[in-house]
Amino acid sequence: MKKVTLLVLCASLTVAATGAWLAEAAHAQAAQAALQYPTTKTVDHVDTYHGTTIADPYRWLEDDTSAETAAWVEAQNKVTFAYLDKIPYRAQLTKRLNALYNYAKYSSPSRKGENYFFSKNDGLQNQSVLYIQKGLNGTPEVLIDPNTWSEDGTFRLMGYAASKDGKLLTYGVSRSGSDWQEYRVLDLTTRKLLTDKIEWVKVSGIAWRGNGFYYSRYPAPAKGKELSSINEDHMVYYHRIGTPQSADELVFRDEKNPQRFHTLSTTEDERFAVLDVSDRGTGKQGNAVFVMDVSKPGAKFTPLIPNIGDDTYNVLESVRGELLAFTDNNAPNGRVVRIDPAKPDPANWTVIVEPKSDTIDTVAVAGGKVIVTYMKDVASKAYVHSIEGALENEVELPGLGSVSGFGGNMDDTSLFYTFTSFTYPTSIFRYEVAARKSSLFRAPAMPGLDTNQYETKQVFFTSKDGAKVPMFLVHKKGITLDGNNPTLMYGYGGFNIATTPGFNSLRIALLEQGFVYASVNMRGGSEYGEAWHDAGTKLKKQNVFDDFIAAAEWLVANKYTNPSKLAAQGGSNGGLLVGAVINQRPDLFRVAIPQVGVMDMLRFHKFTIGWNWIADYGSSDNAEEFKALRAYSPLHNIKTGQKYPATLVTTADHDDRVVPAHSFKYAAALQKAASRDNPVLIRIDTKSGHGASNVTKQIEATADIYAFIMFNLGVTPKF
């Protein structure tokens, strides 16, 4: 697409608007001219991949615990926050974001025994509080308040699970945004914390059986070693309440395959322990499943799905001694089957829910029913089936949006689910199983916020290879399509994860200033089943970037915006997306926000559990995959002297999923190579991880990102 020049852009504005825009542009240029990036030393390090030498001059930044790296982080943050401090409306924007976020947010209730559990955040609490009440009409009482755990509010309550009788509750604690957890146990009768403490937990469920629970963990690190040194040898243990962790029973271990994940769940009747095994580090997308009938003395695991391939299997529940399971085996859009553990051969399976043209999103077995949600062009539909699979009814939803939930116990008479869309605040609905009716259970009270002034459109555009790709557009009603609307594009495109419609009150701060928000559903996600996912993986990863670029070109061609008004944002795999597309099409975007991105595609599998992503990305250890990775790796395709968009890289010191070294090396390389036309900054949060560790940090980061976007797009917000 031909880039719109400044002359053409200004010609379409009023005289007053032109003057304001030019003043803002001059201010931005002055701020950029004053930037002095910290000096980042280089080292003479070269790796050889399949006969190709690749320099890695910033290898030293991979040691994020060294004093030298800490000094570099401090120097970079000093420059970044000095730049952000000069944005005149940043404080007002922060105030507005706090106001937009300040409303009560609830989770759906869940039941064990006579107790119901739900979480609530009053508005601006750093952490949501877990409540308990007897019966659905009982009086809620605070059960766990994580805000009391640390002065800075960065300790988080992670997953929790109550025992079958509802008398005990196990919950996880994370510090400063880390993926590592510690499990504790609470007596729900006395409300006292028991002495049980489980450490070194990661990638784990909490699966109760009798007077204890199963969990997954790694070995304790050697004395003086960092946690990053123990991301191999994932084991399953059984913990009996009231005993020390040292007495826990080792249930499963596979020392020959140290990079496999082993997680265990139990069926509601606690008869079956279901072991799930994945080996994504070898490039396999699927999993194996083993089952143990714990009702039998001396029971051992027997294979349900003995081998790991590219098909996914998820055991949902046991019914009359057989297992209901979701799978995409021979069904790229998914199906539900019933399996007899004594006759697990697929030839003996009974299909409960046949595959459809729409993609299965979730399956819940609760209330004596099988509830299946589908995605139809990325919008949810929900259907209720009998346990035998007969379709009974569709659940009427408020409109086009995303639904989740329907979980519960087999004897529940009511189930709960949430519904949300870009302009529909997340609300909780109650589904009465016998009556087959839904009713609004709880909707957020948001005084002064009128979401009716905004609208959502879904459009389809054609990508480079002819694929039709959907995109949602959210903006004020009645906008003028003159090519001058400030626009923020967001995308993810990977790991079989769909980017579905969802409400975010912080996004209103953009919409009310005239922004168009574009959510792109590139290949690599699950929007259209496994085929859509597969089309954006490994040697086909370039499809994802082509889709995003085609979306940007569509927005320009259809006069929603122009390249001087266009920003791109994505996190994690989406951070990789942004880094790749601004290398390939720097002319198409004015601002880029790559957050916690996977930027070094040749070494990602060397850090923490990065090897787990080989199933999606491939590996530089493979000659053919190396060639594909090298072709788009954000770090390795930066062009010297190129005019890049104004770029704000974000990461955090406790991100032990996508380690900050990715962003450190990328920012250093981009600062050195890019022309001086636009700022290249990195914002490094403290006591946070792959996402913000508390609400305060979330709002602060959002304010800085939005301020950076507005400032560099020439948008002066009106408050």
Image (tube, grey):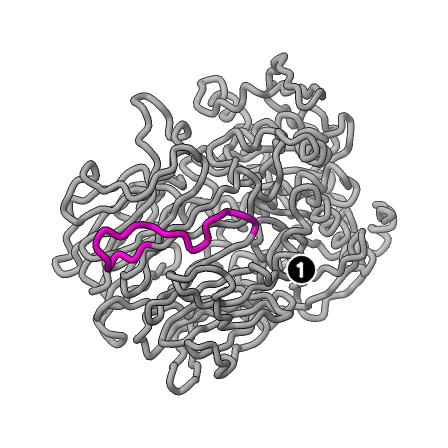
Q: Is residue 296 above or below residue 571?
A: below
Quarter occupied by residue 34: top right
Kind of residue at badge 1: Gly
Residue 439 percent location from the top left of the image? 42, 81
Q: Judge from the rendering whether residue 533 lies leftward or rightward of residue 468; answer left or right.
A: left
Q: Nearer the viewer, residue 110 or 37?
A: 110
**Residue placed most toward the observer, 621 or 58:** 621
Q: Is residue 306 magenta?
A: yes
Q: Quadrant of the C terminus?
A: bottom right
Q: Nearer the viewer, residue 253 or 396?
A: 253
Residue 48: x and y, percent?
A: 66, 19
* Residue 60, horizontal then vertical, whole percent: 54, 19
Q: Is residue 593 magenta?
A: no
Q: What is the magenta range?
A: 292-310
Q: Is residue 600 left or right of residue 643?
A: left
Please say if 29 is above or below 335. Answer: above
The structure residue drawn at horizontal position 49% and vertical position 25%, both measured from the top left corner, is: 74
Q: Is residue 65 left or right of residue 543?
A: left
Q: Residues within 10 Å of mark 1 (few under 14, many from 20)?
A: some
Residue that mark 1 sits on: 514
Residue 479 locus on image (x, y percent): 73, 66
